[in-house]
Amino acid sequence: MTEQSPALDNLLTESRTFPPSETFSAQANATADFYAEADADREAFWAKQAERLHWETKWSQVLDWTNAPVAKWFVGGKLNVAYNCVDRHVADGHGEQVAIHWVGEPGDSRDITYAQLKDEVSKAANAFESLGLTAGDRVAIQMPMVPEAIVAMLACARIGAMHSVVFGGFSPTALRSRVDDAAAKVVITTDGQYRRGKAAPMKVNVDEALEGAESVEKVIVVRRTGDEVPLTEGRDVWWHDLVDGQSAEHAPQAFDSEHPLFILYTSGTTGKPKGILHTSGGYLTQAAYTHHNVFDHKAGEDVYWCTADIGWITGHSYIVYGPLANRATQVVYEGTPNPPHEGRHWEIVQQHKVSIYYTAPTLIRTFMKWGNEIPEKYDLSSLRVLGSVGEPINPEAWMWYREHVGANSAPIVDTWWQTETGGIMISPLPGVTSTKPGSAQKALPGISAKVVDDQGVEVGKGGGGYLVLDKPWPGMLRGIWGDEQRFRETYWSRFADQGYYFAGDGAKYDADGDIWLLGRVDDVMNVSGHRISTTEVESALVSHPTVAEAAVVGATDPTTGQGIVAFVILRGNAVDGGEQAVQELRNHVAKEIGPIAKPRQILVVQELPKTRSGKIMRRLLRDVAENRQVGDVTTLADSSVMDLISSGLKTGK
Ligand code: PRX
């Protein structure tokens, strides 16, 4: 069963609610009757949502679930995703509307209209085709948040090639394993990137990653920092040399609704990341529907800003596909939140009159730490909807967000979803739901979620258990790239009898039947809203020559949600586990996976607690990492181990 931290327990005693204001409700996109409408006929409801897109050929069937768990949505329908996100807005007379207010970290900026975006995407599509890329090919993209990253994704979609975006902070090793797994033909990157006020290299890391990578034929390099980078003859080409001279005319071809759109790798419970596969029509329908209703987005009026990185699913669905399908004007910001000062986000909100702001609890907690006086210096009166995503938001952070960012009036939508779900699944609807600090509350109209016990039986009000999705939804993953068995095992075997999708999250109903998310129940950590598997970090640690064994746990952290704490046993001949050795191990993990996976703390121990079958009991290690009394040790093969660990830590050995 789920192991709850004290902080999460506190969430459940929350009793404040905030009903929507009448003025907000009167203008809201969503209405309360959506729920009943969707319940009455889910497929008809989704068909109606799909009508917000332009279909070259209409579907003949809304859902085909006969080959479950692989769904087909809008069967027989044909559309071009990029056309839907760009061209049709120009065709509808909105070519002059700004699609992207791009803000570079060092202070440079670019405004890109829909007409310009159409030209850029068309040129890039022509360029990609000139390299021989065709529908179904894979393109890996490791780039910072520059407009070309979005253009590249849309150009892939336009020609039916699949993108696999790899977060810019991932190491060469991590990039390489993703490039190999998908057999990417083309890799797109930049010379460097601005991070925390400094230019950092990118292309050289890509070069390191691609050494001997057999599938890769071309590397396209966007100039960003201007740093000199070596180009490999015959393989590497500058974006500006390849793209700028292309024709801005490109006829978009309509692809099947189930044509693959992208792969996005995410951490699972083993060391190997899973390539989550999403397809076109259903995914785009859900991204657009949720963006429209959950954020109450009004095309041509709102200025929307999602602070995620395109390296994560939030960036895919709520920077690229959802907002652009809905003709949003949005801010895209390149950098970290505090160069050159801690008011950077609020300055951008004020300057662009941002009305919808979507971010992660970890950042909200950071803002809280920086102080109330920082947002107070700016005019944030344009903000009318605030969103949260990535991890449970504690009521304190929720209240701070409401008070100091939302002027005690903007509705807050706490959106639960996953890479696998493609779009938002559980969330309040602004203007409809009375919100509660800390709860994602209800499955959206058209979505069905339940909290069940070990046997798959739904628990009652006040009960806790596992979160499942009991009915197919349009944006659902269609598989794990190249590993159908893992797809079935990971998501569909836990509640196979009932046919439920197992999300991997613990959850609870409160007395009103609202859902509270309680964090992962598997070996996946959530650090600053990023999913990292304990096994991945353990593998990185044991790949270091001094480490014999490692066990990693996610310990509650006041800012990042969870922090990575590693317990390592050094090899017999390794020198002591002093500060320097620990530092080296932390850096080693950063090098193997990326800085986001760097353990907050590494504790050198003599033994690890294991069950008789040899399974590490992370629960006990979490007790140690969170300075709690160690729990039940009766299933340990050797129950004195915990004493040894605790006393070793006290004496610093
Ligand atoms: O544990 C849940 C947590 O993030 C996981 C999904 O991570 P990822 O695929 O990287 O996608 C993150 C952005 C959608 C979930 O299994 N999670 C996400 N949103 C919330 C959340 N936990 C609680 N509340 C949320 N709003």
Image (cartoon, rainbow, N blue to C red):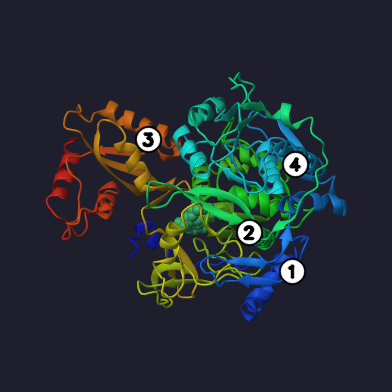
Residue at 58% over, 60% down: 424
Residue at 69% over, 68% down: 30
Q: Earlier in the sequence, mark 3 or mark 4?
A: 4
The answer to whether one can see residue 397 in this image is no
In x, y percent, where is residue 627? 27, 48
Placement of 637 over or under 17, stated as above or below: above
Q: Tell me the element at label 4.
A: helix
Tell me, for residue 283, which label it has, or none. Answer: 2
The number of callouts visible is 4
Quick one: which residue is furthest to the right in this view? 93
Q: Earlier in the sequence, mark 1 or mark 3?
A: 1
How crowded is the residue under tag 4: few (<14 C-alpha within 10 Å), some, or many (20+)? many
Quadrant of the frame with the C terminus: top left
The residue under label 2 is which amino acid type? Answer: Tyr
The residue under label 3 is which amino acid type? Answer: Val
Q: Earlier in the sequence, mark 4 or mark 2?
A: 4
- Mark 4 and mark 2: Cα distance apart in space: 20 Å
Q: Tell me the element at label 3.
A: helix
Reading the image, the residue beneath label 1 is 26
Of residues 180 and 114, the one drawn nearer to the viewer in this rendering: 180
- Mark 4 and mark 1: Cα distance apart in space: 38 Å
Reading the image, the residue beneath label 3 is 589
The residue under label 4 is which amino acid type? Answer: Val
| Residue 489 picture quarter | bottom left
Q: Earlier in the sequence, mark 2 or mark 1?
A: 1
Reading the image, the residue beneath label 4 is 121
> Does mark 3's beta carbon lie closer than 8 Å to ligand 1?
no
